[in-house]
Amino acid sequence: MDMGLDNLFAVVISDGSVMLIKGGSIKSEYCWWKGEIAAYQSIRDVLKRLRHINMDLLPREIPRCYV
């Protein structure tokens, strides 16, 4: 689903509660997390190239957050 930057969508919960959510705020948070994950993966890759560290201490994979 592509929410875009200016799109709004409504969420209705079974108890009758309603929320109006702006797509731009969710998309900006997603982009921030994507950058954070890329930074940590880059650090991990640099550390893997350095052979003087114990490879068992590095995370196998950083969990990804998909929207």
Image (cartoon, helix red, strand yellow):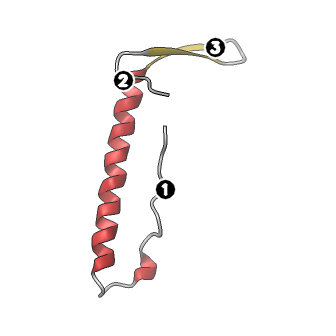
For discs 3 and 1, the disc positioned in front in the rendered view: 1
- Other-residue count near label 2 (Cα within 10 Å), few / some / many at <14 / 14–19 / ≥20: some
Helix, strand or loop at disc 3? loop
Q: Is residue 57 left or right of residue 12?
A: left
Helix, strand or loop at disc 1? loop
Which is more N-terminal, label 3 or label 2?
3
Q: Quadrant of residue 52?
A: bottom left
How many numbered discs, if any? Answer: 3
Q: Amino acid at mark 3?
A: Ser
Mark number for residue 24? 2
Helix, strand or loop at disc 2? helix
Instruction: Please report contact status of discs 3 and 1: CB closer than 8 Å, yes or no.
Output: no
**What residue is disc 1 on?**
63
Which residue is painted at 33% across and 76% down in the image? 48
Position of residue 65 measured from the top left corner of the image (x, y, whole percent):
48, 46
Which residue is painted at 50% across and 15% down in the image? 9
**What residue is disc 3 on?**
17
Q: Amino acid at mark 2?
A: Gly
Position of residue 24 measured from the top left corner of the image (x, y, whole percent):
36, 23
Position of residue 11 measured from the top left corner of the image (x, y, whole percent):
58, 17
Q: Measure the alpha-carbon separation of dots 2 and 3.
A: 22 Å
When the figure is inspected, residue 21 is found, relative to residue 54, above or below; the finding is above
Q: Measure the alpha-carbon separation of dots 3 and 1.
A: 32 Å
Position of residue 46 measured from the top left corner of the image (x, y, whole percent):
27, 71
Which is more N-terminal, label 1 or label 2?
2
